[in-house]
Image (tube, helix red, strand yellow):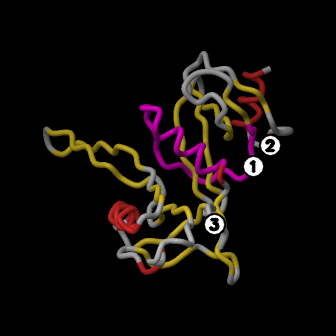
């Protein structure tokens, strides 16, 4: 494992936030991105904090910490490709972190492996890269963690300036998004 690199750790069911706290208590830099989920029960609205990537927490490896990440309470193991721990791209962690810190609504989203890659040029997400999706009049930015094949979605303000980074769109939504940007 590479010192300072981010890795995805698999957690026990509904133990993501607990695992994040336990990793931090060991001295690791841990990150469990969350979103607020609202559900109406009878005449009340209940708000709960849920993980954006259920079953996973991210941890920056530090070889000088005595306790191993995988021996942490709530952690099942490290995500691997073959026998090797799979690094999570620093830019992907930074993009998700920026979405979570922006005080806007996010929600889990299906993984979007191919699409219109964009870079946000204005507003609270300036510099964030992701996939632009258009649904009618609404535009969403999809940010992915490719190693997990999971994504996060947030709504974009209509005045947000974007730069197209990738080639031709293939789906109808992507073609519409590319047309809106032209």
Residue 76 in picture, x, y percent from top left: 45, 78
On the picture, is 108 further left or further right than 112? left
Query: Disc 1 marks which residue?
Result: 114
Tell us which disc is closer to us: 2 or 1. Answer: 1
Residue at image location 66% in from the left, 32% down from the top: 127
Instruction: Report crowding for label 2: few under 14, some 14 to 19, many 20 or more residues within 10 A (C-alpha).
Output: few
- Asked if residue 43 is positioned above or below residue 86 in the image, the reply reads above
Residue 116 in picture, x, y percent from top left: 75, 38
Q: Does the CB distance between marks 2 and 1 fall below 8 Å?
A: yes
Q: Disc 2 to disc 1, how far (Cα)?
A: 8 Å
Picture quarter with the N terminus:
bottom right
Q: Secondary structure at mark 3?
A: loop
Specify start and end residues of the magenta stretch as a single range. Answer: 91-117
For residue 171, which quarter of the picture?
A: top right
Instruction: Report crowding for label 1: few under 14, some 14 to 19, many 20 or more residues within 10 A (C-alpha).
Output: few
Query: Disc 3 marks which residue?
Result: 3
Q: Disc 3 to disc 2, how far (Cα)?
A: 38 Å
Q: Disc 1 to disc 3, how far (Cα)?
A: 30 Å
Q: Earlier in the sequence, mark 1 or mark 3?
A: 3
Query: Disc 2 marks which residue?
Result: 170
Q: Does the CB distance between marks 3 and 2 fall below 8 Å?
A: no
On the picture, is 145 further left or further right than 113? left
């Amino acid at each position: 494992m590479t010192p300072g690199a981010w890795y995805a750790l698999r957690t026990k069911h509904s133990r993501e936030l607990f695992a994040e706290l336990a990793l931090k208590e060991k001295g690791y830099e841990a990150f469990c991105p969350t979103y607020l989920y609202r559900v109406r029960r009878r005449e009340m609205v209940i708000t709960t904090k849920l993980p954006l990537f259920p079953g996973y927490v991210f941890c920056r490896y530090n070889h000088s910490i005595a306790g191993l990440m995988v021996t942490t309470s709530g952690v099942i193991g490290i995500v691997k490709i073959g026998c090797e721990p799979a690094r999570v791209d620093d830019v992907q962690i930074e993009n998700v972190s920026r979405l979570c810190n922006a005080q806007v609504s996010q929600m889990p989203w299906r993984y979007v492996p191919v699409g219109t890659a964009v870079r946000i040029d204005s507003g609270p997400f300036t510099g964030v890269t992701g996939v632009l999706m258009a649904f009618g009049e609404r535009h969403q930015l999809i940010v992915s963690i490719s190693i997990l094949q999971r994504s996060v979605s947030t709504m974009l303000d209509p005045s947000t300036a974007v730069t197209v980074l990738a080639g031709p769109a293939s789906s109808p939504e992507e073609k519409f998004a590319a047309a809106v940007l032209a």
